[in-house]
Image (cartoon, helix red, strand yellow):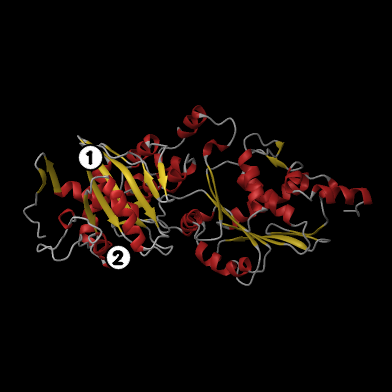
Amino acid sequence: MSELSVIEQIKQKIEISDPLKFFEHVKILDATTNQIIPYEMWPHLVEFIEAIFTYSLVIVLKSRQVGVSWTLAAIAIYWCYKTGANVIMISKGEAEAKELLRKSRFIYSQLPKYLQVEIEREGSEMVSFKNKRSRIHTLPSTEYAGVGETASLVIWDENEFHPNDEENWAHLKPTIDAGAHGIVVSTTEPTKLNSHFKTLWRNAREGKNNFHPIFIGWDAVPNRDAEWLERVRKDYELPWQFKANYPATEEEALSPILGRMVFDGAALQRMQQNAVKEEEIRQGCVHIYRRPELGVQYMAGVDMAEGRGGDYSVCWIEGSKGLSRELVAVIHTNHILPDTFTFMSYELLKEYYFPRIICGADAWGQMFLDDIVPLGYDRGKIYSSDKKREKLGYQESGKTRDLDLAKMAKAILGNMQIHYIPAIKEFFAFQIGENSRMEVAAGSHDDLVMAACKANFGFREYKYSNQGIKVTYSNTWRG
């Protein structure tokens, strides 16, 4: 390629000063028609591009065919306008790695001549640019991919399907720590319960890592509607495969195969759709959906934690009227110390006529109970596994936990409504693990679910009558 004229150099400098302006010159190859078409700046892609240049780490949970791969290929070219840039693109295997680079080379070939910096070397696994001393290097996800590499941008494409994703992340994390940008994108594989990608995503949503999360559903692409979705659905024999490839929500994308979900997915989706959108929020962590009513029988489940940014403390208040049950109020926080949380719970429970409390008998639960009784809470309304009631609290074990989760799964199928969306998300995250145990997916919490299980235990164990609370025990109950 000949040297650029002064005018061409000025035009190049202007066009690459803004990545969105650069994308106006990008052309791609349409997979359906095999025609060269202009790159379309769909709103979700603009958000993605802007995020890449705003945050050093971006993670994308996506549907298929939403334009992300071509965007990554173009970003790789754009990055190489920086002197000394080294872009590493990691894909599932060798064929996938070469295909992603092929897209970058195609985009380069369609750029105006003044945007085509001189190529120094070009192959199926690498392309380098002479004057900028920059390059794009593709790697399959092998065990040692990324060892010793120093990069300015690392792209993990379809990361969920990488056979050595954790090892590759460990090898390349030092270059990220040194200032490189990182982009992790993927659809999901529902047979993988606790993949590295899902853990990164959940931690990003919780603010536990430095990734900026973006979800892109099937309907992000303009002109996709219910008719389009139904047409695509017909090509999939297994519903879970279709849901994984074309999720509408994060919950659908992250849900395991329905046969592995602890709680019924359809029931949880109905809950989410019917959830009360308006809520009264107090002190940032108290969520009220129904004010106290006479004639409603209330039950409280408490799951207590340290309150220093780790696990959450939860006070779950549920109301039962006739055959219906409903979450009426919840305290959910991991930034309030135990004594403050106890006082807040006492004040809220007082509003709901001091319902019976089911609280764990572990160290943190015991601290809650030891603090709430002196505030004036009736010991008789606090459940105790101790037959002599010398020690208050619900004594939990692996066996009681499994039973409580199984009974909760049955309750979810009944006439029950949960309005607090973070709680519904926790229910979605529970699955049957490889050891056939019910467990929450890595990176998720279980505090809301376990508090709900305690309230559900209370409704199972205690029957109400006009004369007050009547306690019933099974034949095998031992305190």
Residue 433 in sight in this render:
no
Q: For the residue carrying disc 2, how many other residues have a C-alpha within 10 Å: few (<14), some (14-19), or many (20+)? A: some
> Of all residues shown, which one is farthest toward the bottom?
148
> Of all residues shown, which one is farthest toward the right?
6
Mark toward the start of the polypeptide (1 vs 2): 1
* Residue 386 location (% of width, % of height): 13, 63
Residue occupied by mark 1: 320
- Residue at image position (79%, 51%) is 17
Give the distance between the C-alpha atoms of the residues marked 1 and 2, in whole angstroms: 28 Å
- Residue at image position (38%, 61%) is 311
417 above or below 405? above
| The C terminus - image quarter | bottom left
Query: Looking at the rendered structure, which numbered label has been put on residue 434?
Result: none
Q: Is residue 210 left or right of residue 358?
A: right
Foreground residue, 14 or 432?
A: 14
* Residue 393 location (% of width, % of height): 20, 61
Residue 244 in sight in this render:
yes
* Residue 162 location (% of width, % of height): 52, 58
Mark 2 belongs to which amino acid?
Trp
* Residue 53 location (% of width, % of height): 68, 53
Foreground residue, 241 or 200?
A: 200
145 above or below 77? below
- Quadrant of res 3: bottom right
Mark 1 belongs to which amino acid?
Ser
234 above or below 349? above
Foreground residue, 96 or 443?
A: 443
Residue occupied by mark 2: 364
Q: Is residue 365 left or right of residue 14?
A: left
